[in-house]
Structure formats: C-alpha cells, structure tokens
Image (cartoon, rainbow, N blue to C red):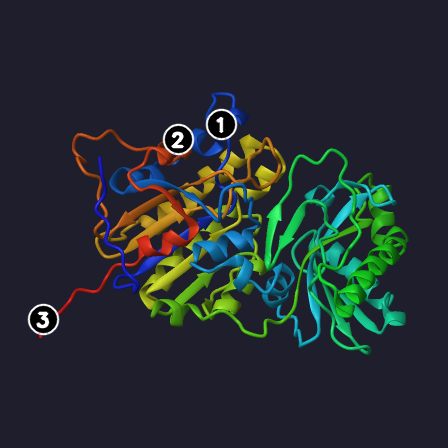
C-alpha cells in the first residue's frame, strides 16, 4: 500500500495543520494494551485515515522530549533552538505584555511545595483558579521584591496555575536570558525547552548563568532572590489561608523556566518563508505568542470553557471559516495533554473521543476533501505512565487533495493510532517535513 503525495513550497489549495497537544502515548497504560488514542472511539479520524495516509513524526530529534512551543515551531518548519526567543517571551506576547529591550520574561507555574524548595505538586492539583492566581500575582508584584536590586518584578497570571515573571531593569543596564531553569522539570537549550520526567524528589534548582557575562550573573542572582522572597509572600497570602482552611493544596511555591528577551533578529515571517498567508486558531497564550512571532493572523479563542461540546463545535466552525480566507491554517487543541500529565489514561481517552465527535465531526461535515489538504499530528507525546513529555514519535494523518490510499477498495478500514501510524505509508518523518507534505505545487502553465 502506498500514497500519492506531491510536495511543494506554496499552498495552492487551502491547507490545515491540526495539532492535538500531547496526543501520543504508550500502550501499556491502558488495560487492553492499547494507547488512549487506540482505545478511543474515533470514527471521524478513522474515516480520514482510511482514505488518507498515515505515518509518524519525530518532532525534533531522537531523545528530545520537546515542550509544546518547541514542538509547534518545528512542525511549522522553524528551528526552535535558533528561532525561538524563549518560552517566557512567547507566553508574554500571548497576553500582550509590553516587553522592551533589556527585559526578560519567564514562564511561571504556581506550585505546591514544602516551604524549602521541594515540589509536592507542580500544578497545585490543577485546582488553582485564574482568579486566585491573579490575586497571588498582584501580591507578588505589589511587594516589589527586587526593588533593592534595581529591577521591577511583575507577575502576570494567565490561565489557572500558569503565569509569567516579567523582569524590567530600572537601573543597572539590561538583563540577560542566559540563565538556567530553576524549574526542575525542564531543561533549556538555546530558545528551546525540553522536558524531564521521572524525578523522584523534585526540588527548585539554583538559577545559574549560562555564559560569563555580568548581565547573566546579575539576572541569575535576581531570579534566585525573587523565588526565595516570594515564598514568604505566598505563605502569608489570604488566598492560601482560605485554601488551607478548605483542605486544598497551597500555591506556596513558584517554578520558572524558559527565560527570554526580545529577539534582535526575529525569524522570517511565515508568509515570507512559505509565500502564503497563514492564520492560527489557538487556546493557550504560548501558542498565541508563536502566532505573533511568525506573523500568523491571530484567531485566538482562549482556553476551553466547561461546555466542551460548544467549545469544540465553535473551534470547528472557526477553522472552516479560516480555510475560506487563508491558504494555511494552524489549529492547536490543548485537550489530550493535561490528562497525560495527570497520568489518567481514561480521561485522556474521553478527551480524544470528545475532540473526534465535537471538533472533527462538525469540521468534516460537508467538507470537500478534493479541495483541501489536512495534516493531523501532535507537538509531542505525553505518556500517562511518565506524567510528562517524551521523545516518542507521534502519529501523523494526511488527507485531502492528491492523497489516496492505494488499493482503497481492498484495504480494511484504518484506525488512527500509534501502531498503525508506525506502519503507515508515509514512513517516519521529522517535524520540519510536515509542512512540505501539506503544500501542493501550483500547476505549471505553458507559455
């Protein structure tokens, strides 16, 4: 069985790259030996797989477990080490923080700790509301914790336990992003973040400079001071007092990672790199920041509300409308990643089924696949057994114009999942190959 694929640089037909965050998994976490994706009832994805082509993707490289921003940049054909300004900057752009030259921004998690740096829960049990996080952020910002160091330190809450630490030098010259991650769960390589899992006793790490500059040394010391001083503010905050009285986990620790600054030389915009305009339908600030970085039309929809059906149907409609306006549309759905981090394979299966039913069902209804091209994949694997990202390959489904399964009539229906993807016609690709599979060369017109 093979597949007919034409590769090119431009998008001659409307094309969509749909990324299901953390979709891929490992089979042993499910009772029947399948992954959550393989266990899920996904008739719409399976229908696409039966008429299209399957393969798998090593998103960045062997042994690299990417963060979402790194995975997305790679799938969009960029180099996350060279082209990313850092996770913190992408998050900051996603909530319109007005960074200026000399500032640095870091991704921040409110976490639960033992008061001495040991992490008990890196996400406060996913039970910290955005409203609570905003109150904690105001307390930290108002305390002016780095005033004596000539730095204004501002915390911005974003979604749930997530936030941004924004450091602006008031005196003493610019700060440097050349610092390590205090967050023990992630390493930093250039602008790219990679995941670490399986830590037995995770502890906030000292922030160290990664070059010999005075700016890096000053910045690393400032971050360490901020984290130490923040513990006292968090421990005494009324939000944590109320959480303690209710028996909830405390948000009494901070994890920061991915320091970045405004890039002196941004990467080429998507339209310049590919010769076509693009749009981005995203749910989380970091993916919105990537749209900003690459000059994609920002169609940010925000986090999924409690009514998941309405939310996914709305996203499907937005995607169809965007395909009528733009040659290329990038869609990012957060759903499968969170239960992967929580180690809940059953919840991950349910999320995947919801996306198939309420996003892909409406999205495909009435869609003429002879006039579009669609790629569906993941930015990384989040195996439930690891409760974190891994370097495992992720499945890839390609469907639409000029893509066909050879021997369709004789072939049995395909199931979109890791095992069939590993045996698929497309073989194994790298992240940077995916957009080349989506683009269809324009026909040559004889003079």
- CA gap, disc 1 and disc 3: 52 Å
Q: Is residue 396 left or right of residue 189?
A: left
Asked if residue 314 can be seen in this view, the reply is no
Question: Percent x, y for residue 392?
Answer: 50, 38
- Residue at 17% across, 35% down: 407
- CA gap, disc 1 and disc 2: 9 Å
Say which element carries label 3. loop
Mark 1 and 2 residues: CB-CB less than 8 Å, in contact? yes
| Quadrant containing the N terminus in the rendered view | top left
Residue 120 figure quarter: top right
Task: Give the camera-side residue of 424 and 242.
Answer: 424
Asked if residue 51 can be seen in this view, the reply is yes
Question: Percent x, y for residue 50?
Answer: 27, 37
Q: Which residue is mark 2?
A: 419
Q: Nearer the viewer, mark 1 or mark 3?
A: 3
Q: Earlier in the sequence, mark 1 or mark 3?
A: 1
Q: Is residue 390 left or right of residue 18?
A: right
Q: Is residue 213 left or right of residue 85?
A: right
Say which element carries label 1. helix
Alpha-carbon neighbours of circle 1 within 10 Å: few (<14), some, or many (≥20)?
A: many
Say which element carries label 2. helix
Alpha-carbon neighbours of circle 2 within 10 Å: few (<14), some, or many (≥20)?
A: some
Q: Which residue is mark 1?
A: 27
| Tag of residue 446 | 3
Q: Earlier in the sequence, mark 1 or mark 2?
A: 1
Question: Percent x, y for residue 203?
Answer: 78, 43
Q: Earlier in the sequence, mark 2 or mark 3?
A: 2
- Residue at 42% across, 31% down: 38
**Location of residue 104 with respect to 203 vertically, above or below:** below
| Quadrant containing the C terminus in the rendered view | bottom left
């Amino acid at each position: 069985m093979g597949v007919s694929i034409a590769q090119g640089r431009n998008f001659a037909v409307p094309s969509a790259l749909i990324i299901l965050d953390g979709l891929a998994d490992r089979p042993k976490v499910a009772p029947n030996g399948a992954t959550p994706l393989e266990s899920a009832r996904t008739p719409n994805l399976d229908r696409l797989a039966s008429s299209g082509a399957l393969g798998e993707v090593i998103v960045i490289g062997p042994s690299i477990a990417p963060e979402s921003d790194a995975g997305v940049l790679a799938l969009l054909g960029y180099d996350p080490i060279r082209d990313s300004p850092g996770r913190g900057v992408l998050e900051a752009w996603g909530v319109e923080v007005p960074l200026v030259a000399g500032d640095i921004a870091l991704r921040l998690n409110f976490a639960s700790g033992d008061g001495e740096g040991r992490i008990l829960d890196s996400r406060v049990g996913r039970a910290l509301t955005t409203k609570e996080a905003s109150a904690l952020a105001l307390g930290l910002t108002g305390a002016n914790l780095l005033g004596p160091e000539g730095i204004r330190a501002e915390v911005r809450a974003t979604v749930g336990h997530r936030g941004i630490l924004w450091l602006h030098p008031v005196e003493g010259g610019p700060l440097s992003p050349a610092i390590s991650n205090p967050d023990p769960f992630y390493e930093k390589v250039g602008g790219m973040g990679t995941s670490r899992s399986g830590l037995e006793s995770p502890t906030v790490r000292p922030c160290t400079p990664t070059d010999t500059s005075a700016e890096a040394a000053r910045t690393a010391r400032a971050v360490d001071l901020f984290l130490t001083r923040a513990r006292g503010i968090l421990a005494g905050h009324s939000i944590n007092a109320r959480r303690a009285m209710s028996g909830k986990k405390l948000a009494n620790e901070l994890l920061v990672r991915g320091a970045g600054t405004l890039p002196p030389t941004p990467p080429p915009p998507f339209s310049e790199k590919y010769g076509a305009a693009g749009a981005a339908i995203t749910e989380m600030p970091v993916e919105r920041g990537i749209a900003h970085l690459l000059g994609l039309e920002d169609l940010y929809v925000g986090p999924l509300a409690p009514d998941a059906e309405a939310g996914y149907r709305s996203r499907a409609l937005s995607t169809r409308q965007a395909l009528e306006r733009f040659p290329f549309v990038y869609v990012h759905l957060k759903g499968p990643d969170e239960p992967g981090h929580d180690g809940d394979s059953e919840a991950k299966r349910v999320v995947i089924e919801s996306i198939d039913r309420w996003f892909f069902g409406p999205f495909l209804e009435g869609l003429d696949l002879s006039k579009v091209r669609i790629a569906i994949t993941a930015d990384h694997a989040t195996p439930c057994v690891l409760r974190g990202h891994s370097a495992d390959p992720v499945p890839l489904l390609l469907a639409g114009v000029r893509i066909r399964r050879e021997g369709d009539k004789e072939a049995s229906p395909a199931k979109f999942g890791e095992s069939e993807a590993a045996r698929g016609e497309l073989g194994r690709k790298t992240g940077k190959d995916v957009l080349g599979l989506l683009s269809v060369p324009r026909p040559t017109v004889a003079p």
